[in-house]
Image (cartoon, rainbow, N blue to C red):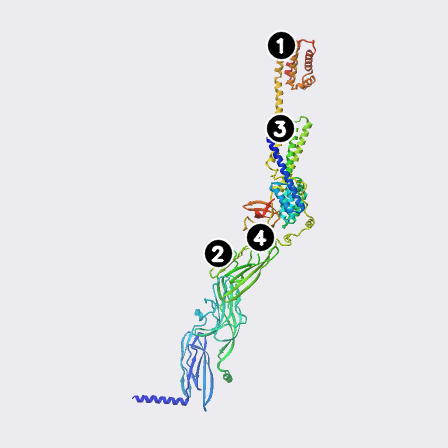
């Protein structure tokens, strides 16, 4: 009986997915015809069904870009990038959209090994690295068991080396997972949607004005008090803005 | 005898008449100013209408004689109806100076005319205090400016002096006062020039007199003396700091026509032509006394934070030309402050404009008039601003604080705030804020965004991150747990195995003996097959258990090997091997039954030896 239920569930899920895929396809076709509004609506419909994928976000970002809504485009490109960090298309379009924003913020430059490390860590998504970590850990376990149990020296040696190599790989893998995690998820990041917003020195309308930022700028949210966020820019400046002026990535 | 006196009187009267007709009426009159002040010079004149001589004047003991007598004479002839009449007037003038206060009488003088002596009338002169304190009590005197007359200063001299009047001697800092300088003169002044205007340290001054206007003239009577009063300078002053501020005196140089007294000149002609009284143009310098104005500092209590020095009574209005516009268009916002007070000295307002608004210095339009009642009018500040980005902005209300000296309190007026809606400008992409692309950007601008992905249509439900989720940690720990479990189990297994071996070892002897017993029984029953089987089992079993050899591995070679390992000597080993061989032989090769007893004894001996040697 239980198995039957599982099968039914599985099948319905598949159908649901199949329906979603069809929707995505039709949205893409609207985009091809230049009917961006219709495409946008279908993309959003998929999102509201709690579905997502890098492609979905990417395509939606493009749709906003075509509609000249740059902050929204940036937002969805960032979301896409989270799921697929190494994707060159997403990176390109994000760079492109960032050029359209008003504030030119100097990004702190990276050292060469940081760049290199970055390029490796973006090969997979965070979860991709997490899964490979688990895999390597299991392989390590197997190796060590072989080492323990075998009688022959040869097998013991083999088991030992397999165990050590797999252990090393799993450590590297978790390191990359952590790095990718820190880059994409650890920070609560958001995009400014308000055309112009004044950053204040404390969470209140009547506090001193620090500086002004415009829509499309990416901020890191450090803290929250009532309806105010404490934000930090990529060049280090920080201050308080109303929470409704940004949208989370 | 009444008739006698009557006749006498008539006689005297007729004689007097005759006398008169004969000699004319001789009149000898003394005259002088009725009221003078101490130190003042005045003329005492004796006039007689006939030529006389031997003038005898009384000593002027209460006065000092400055000059005199100087003589003047005038004559006139008139012919009326054929009758010729000649009349002459001879005057003798003394210039006297009053030295002390009081009421004094100068007694009559006498003169002889035609042998007859005539006497003048006595003259009474009233001498009063000097000028300096004279006008002090004239608080009721009409002052042209202000209500209280408190500030004043006397001049030097008694016939020309300048007095300064301040409309208020105790104003607040920033409150206008009007200071009027009045010139008092008894004599005619032909021209005057202000030498030194008073220094007004600490004041901001504006002249209220038109450049070439004729000063206002009036007359005043001070202590019986008639003065001409002219307003020569009028200033509107605004004190810029508190404390006792001194207004220096105003110095004026003038040319006055003064009746001079000349000594009798020897020159006949001078006497004749110049006349006795002459006027001379004398240059005189007159200075007013300094005036101290006690300026009150503005109270600290209740002073608004944004107070910037405005004193007076004001209202403020604001006007904005539009509130809905596109980016890069201009807005004009005007703040007009009107009222009375130090408008000229108002500080430029600094309203807070929204960021992203380009603002410029305001244009100031003044409509202020300075009059005797101070500065009044209005001043307009016009601000122009240009919003650069779209959005909704608020220009907050601007507050203007001032101090009202009339009420002695601060007041604040607030304008309204304005909400500005700025729509996106035409010509979009805001070029202003850091929009200059560098080389790299220019290259990219020629491209476009990459096309959507159409191949991978797979979507999956949104899920939280697997990494660092609980599931992840469980899966990560799992191999470790499994490893530990395996290790533990394996160890136990090994232990168990070694235990088994141990057990077997211990039991070996017992089992062997049991088997030998069984063999013995079989021997007594003459059951040779069972006997040899048991002996065989006993020995094999014993060796296997003792030396932990698996049953499957039992063979002669294994035994030899293990025995050698255990350092059993070769002889014993051979004996064992032989015995075992015998048993096998006896068991499987029929008819070759050897001596069971021999075999039995051998078996026991071997076991015992092995007991000793094997551990």
**Which chain does the residue under circle 3 lie in?**
B
Disc number for residue B302: 2
Do badges 1 and 4 share one subunit? yes
Do badges 4 and 3 share one subunit? yes
Looking at marks 1 and 4 on the same chain, the residue that comes earlier in the sequence is marked by 4
Q: Position of residue B257 (x, y in %)?
A: 50, 77
Looking at marks 1 and 2 on the same chain, the residue that comes earlier in the sequence is marked by 2
- Figure quadrant of residue B131: bottom left
Seen at 47% across and 86% down, the residue is B75
Q: CA distance from mark 1 to mark 4?
A: 119 Å
Front in this rendered view, residue A194 or B583: A194
Residue reaching furthest to the bottom: B82
Q: Quadrant of the N terminus of chain B?
A: bottom left
Q: Secondary structure at mark 4?
A: strand
Q: CA distance from mark 1 to mark 3?
A: 50 Å
Residue occupied by mark 4 = B392
Looking at marks 4 and 3 on the same chain, the residue that comes earlier in the sequence is marked by 4
Residue occupied by mark 1 = B521
Mark 3 residue crowding within 10 angstroms, few (<14) / some (14–19) / many (20+) = some
Residue occupied by mark 3 = B486
Q: Secondary structure at mark 3?
A: helix
Are discs 1 and 3 less than 8 Å apart at CB? Answer: no
Q: CA distance from mark 4 to mark 3?
A: 70 Å
Mark 4 residue crowding within 10 angstroms, few (<14) / some (14–19) / many (20+) = some
Are discs 2 and 3 less than 8 Å apart at CB? Answer: no
Q: CA distance from mark 1 to mark 2?
A: 132 Å
From the viewer's perspective, is the residue at label 1 or at label 4 nearer? 4
Looking at marks 1 and 3 on the same chain, the residue that comes earlier in the sequence is marked by 3
């Amino acid at each position: 009986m239980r198995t039957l239920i599982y099968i039914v569930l599985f099948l319905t899920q598949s159908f649901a997915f199949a329906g979603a895929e069809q929707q995505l396809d039709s949205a893409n076709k609207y985009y091809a015809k230049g009917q961006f509004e219709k495409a946008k609506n279908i993309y959003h419909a998929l999102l509201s069904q709690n579905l997502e994928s890098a492609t979905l976000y990417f395509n939606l970002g493009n749709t906003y870009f075509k509609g000249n809504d740059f902050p929204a485009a940036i937002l969805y490109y960032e979301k896409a990038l989270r799921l697929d960090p190494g994707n060159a298309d997403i990176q390109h379009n994000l760079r492109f959209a960032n050029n359209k924003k008003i504030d030119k913020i100097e990004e702190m430059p990276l050292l060469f090994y940081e760049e290199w490390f970055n390029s490796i860590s973006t090969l997979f998504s965070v979860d991709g690295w997490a899964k490979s970590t688990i895999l390597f850990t299991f392989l390590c376990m197997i190796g060590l068991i072989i080492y323990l149990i075998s009688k022959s020296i040869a097998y013991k040696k083999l088991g030992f080396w397999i165990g050590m190599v797999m252990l090393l790989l799993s450590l590297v893998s978790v390191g990359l997972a952590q790095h990718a995690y820190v880059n994409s998820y650890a920070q609560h990041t958001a995009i400014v949607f308000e055309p112009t917003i004044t950053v204040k020195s404390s969470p209140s309308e009547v506090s001193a004005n620090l500086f002004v930022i415009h829509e499309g700028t990416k901020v890191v949210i450090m803290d929250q008090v009532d309806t105010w966020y404490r934000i930090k820019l990529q060049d280090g400046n920080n201050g308080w803005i109303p929470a409704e002026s940004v949208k989370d990535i | 005898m009444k008739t006698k006196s009557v006749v006498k009187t008539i006689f005297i009267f007729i004689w007097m008449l005759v006398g008169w007709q004969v000699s004319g009426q001789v009149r000898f009159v003394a005259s002088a100013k009725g009221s003078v002040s101490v130190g003042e010079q005045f003329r005492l004149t004796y006039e007689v209408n006939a030529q006389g001589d031997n003038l005898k004047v009384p000593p002027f003991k209460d006065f000092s004689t400055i000059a005199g007598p100087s003589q003047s004479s005038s004559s006139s002839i008139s012919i009326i109806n054929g009758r010729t009449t000649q009349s002459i007037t001879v005057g003798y003038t003394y210039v006297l100076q009053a030295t002390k206060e009081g009421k004094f009488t100068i007694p009559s003088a006498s003169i002889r005319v035609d042998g007859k002596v005539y006497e003048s009338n006595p003259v009474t002169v009233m001498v009063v205090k000097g000028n300096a304190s004279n006008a002090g009590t004239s608080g009721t005197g009409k002052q042209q400016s202000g209500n209280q007359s408190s500030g004043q200063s006397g001049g030097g001299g008694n016939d020309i002096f300048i007095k300064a009047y301040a409309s208020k001697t105790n104003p607040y800092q920033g409150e206008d006062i009007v200071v009027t300088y009045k010139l008092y003169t008894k004599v005619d002044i032909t021209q005057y020039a202000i030498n030194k205007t008073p220094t007004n340290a600490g004041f901001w001054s504006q002249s209220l007199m038109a450049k070439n206007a004729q000063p206002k003239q009036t007359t005043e009577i001070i202590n019986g003396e008639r003065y001409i009063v002219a307003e020569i300078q009028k200033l509107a002053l605004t004190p810029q700091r508190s404390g006792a501020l001194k207004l220096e005196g105003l110095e004026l140089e003038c040319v006055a026509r003064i009746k001079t007294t000349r000594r009798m000149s020897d020159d006949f002609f001078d006497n004749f032509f110049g006349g006795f009284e002459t006027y001379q143009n004398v240059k005189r310098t007159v200075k007013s006394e300094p005036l101290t104005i006690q300026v009150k500092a503005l109270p600290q209590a209740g002073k608004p934070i944004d107070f910037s020095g405005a004193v007076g009574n004001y209202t403020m209005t604001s006007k904005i030309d539009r509130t809905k516009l596109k980016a890069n268009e201009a807005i004009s916002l005007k703040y007009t402050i009107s009222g009375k007070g130090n408008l000229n000295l108002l500080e430029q307002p600094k309203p807070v404009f929204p960021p992203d608004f380009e603002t410029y210095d305001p244009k100031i339009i003044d409509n202020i008039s300075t009059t005797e009642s101070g500065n009044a009018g209005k001043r307009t500040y016009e601000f122009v601003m240009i919003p650069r980005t779209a959005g909704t902005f608020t220009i907050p209300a601007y507050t203007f604080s001032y101090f009202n000296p009339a009420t002695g309190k601060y007041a604040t007026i607030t304008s309204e705030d304005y909400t500005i809606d700025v729509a996106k400008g035409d010509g979009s992409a805001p070029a202003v804020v850091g929009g200059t692309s560098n080389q790299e950007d220019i290259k990219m601008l020629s491209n476009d965004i990459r096309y959507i992905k159409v191949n991978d249509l797979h979507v999956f439900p949104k899920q939280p991150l697997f990494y660092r989720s609980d599931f992840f940690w469980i899966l990560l720990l799992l191999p470790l747990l499994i490893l530990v479990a395996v290790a533990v189990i394996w160890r136990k297994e090994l232990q168990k195995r070694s235990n088994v071996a141990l057990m077997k070892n211990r039991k070996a002897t017992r089992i062997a003996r049991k088997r030998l017993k069984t063999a013995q029984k079989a021997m007594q029953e003459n059951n040779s097959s069972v006997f040899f089987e048991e002996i065989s089992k006993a020995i094999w079993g014993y060796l296997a258990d003792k030396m932990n050899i698996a049953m499957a591995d039992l063979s002669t070679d294994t035994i030899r090997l293990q025995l050698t390992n255990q350092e059993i000597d070769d002889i014993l080993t051979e004996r064992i091997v032989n015995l075992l061989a015998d048993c096998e032989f006896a068991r499987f090769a029929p008819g070759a039954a050897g001596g069971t007893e021999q075999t039995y004894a051998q078996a026991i001996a071997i076991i015992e030896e092995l007991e000793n040697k094997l551990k």
